[in-house]
Image (cartoon, grey):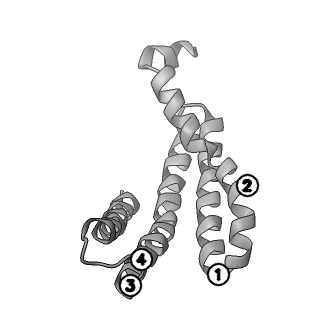
Amino acid sequence: MAFALAGAAIALICKLAQTVTTAIPAIEPQSNTAGTLLSFYTNGGMANEIFYGLWLLPLGLLILKSDLIPKVIGILLLVTCVCHLIDFGTFFFAPGVSATVQPVLYAGEIGEFVLVLWLLIKGVKTREQRVLKI
């Protein structure tokens, strides 16, 4: 929960920086202030990846331990967690590799999408379904 809250706070601050840059006409688009705010938006968004990724770790482990949602979704969430962390690491520590690796990492982030689809379409098993092993 703390990772999700920290990620939401960082995302809000980054979005505020982007909004200030585009909404205030006194800031020239080519000025240092605008450039600083936009780089804060970009770098802050990427720094937020670590919180998005770390949030998926306990969620994936909980899904693996429970029998309410298929275990393959828990594994996909753990893979997605690793993809977020690699995305964060390559952006800040290996910027030359980041552009090459990002399309592969985005493909690896399918776990979140699969979880949402599963919950919308199938839902979790009820107590009766677990007893009957449906």
Q: Position of residue 116 (x, y in %)?
A: 49, 34
Residue 31: which disc? 3
Q: Position of residue 85 (x, y in %)?
A: 60, 65
Q: Secondary structure at mark 2?
A: helix
Is residue 13 placed above or below 109 in the rendered structure?
Answer: below
Q: Earlier in the sequence, mark 4 or mark 3?
A: 3
| Mark 4–mark 1 distance (CA, rounded to whole Å) | 17 Å
Residue occupying the point 49% across, 15% down: 129
Which of these two is toward me, 81 or 26? Answer: 26
**4 or 3: mark nearer the eye:** 3
Type of amino acid at the residue the image marks with label 4: Phe
Q: Are marks 4 and 3 in contact (CB under 8 Å)?
A: no
**4 or 1: mark nearer the eye:** 4
Residue occupying the point 42% across, 81% down: 30
Type of amino acid at the residue the image marks with label 3: Ser
| Mark 1–mark 2 distance (CA, rounded to whole Å) | 18 Å
Few, some or many C-alpha atoms within 10 Å of disc 2 (few <14, some 14-19, many ≥20)?
few
Which of these two is toward me, 5 or 44? Answer: 44
Q: Position of residue 32 (x, y in %)?
A: 39, 87
Type of amino acid at the residue the image marks with label 1: Phe
Q: Earlier in the sequence, mark 2 or mark 3?
A: 3
Q: Earlier in the sequence, mark 1 or mark 2?
A: 1
Which of these two is toward me, 27 or 70? Answer: 27
Is residue 68 placed above or below 35 in the rendered structure?
Answer: above
Q: Earlier in the sequence, mark 4 or mark 1?
A: 4
| Mark 2–mark 3 distance (CA, rounded to whole Å) | 35 Å
Residue 40: which disc? 4
**1 or 3: mark nearer the eye:** 3
The quarter of the picture where residue 28 lies is bottom left
Q: Look at mark 1 in the image and give the residue it sits on.
A: 93
Q: Look at mark 2 in the image and give the residue it sits on.
A: 104
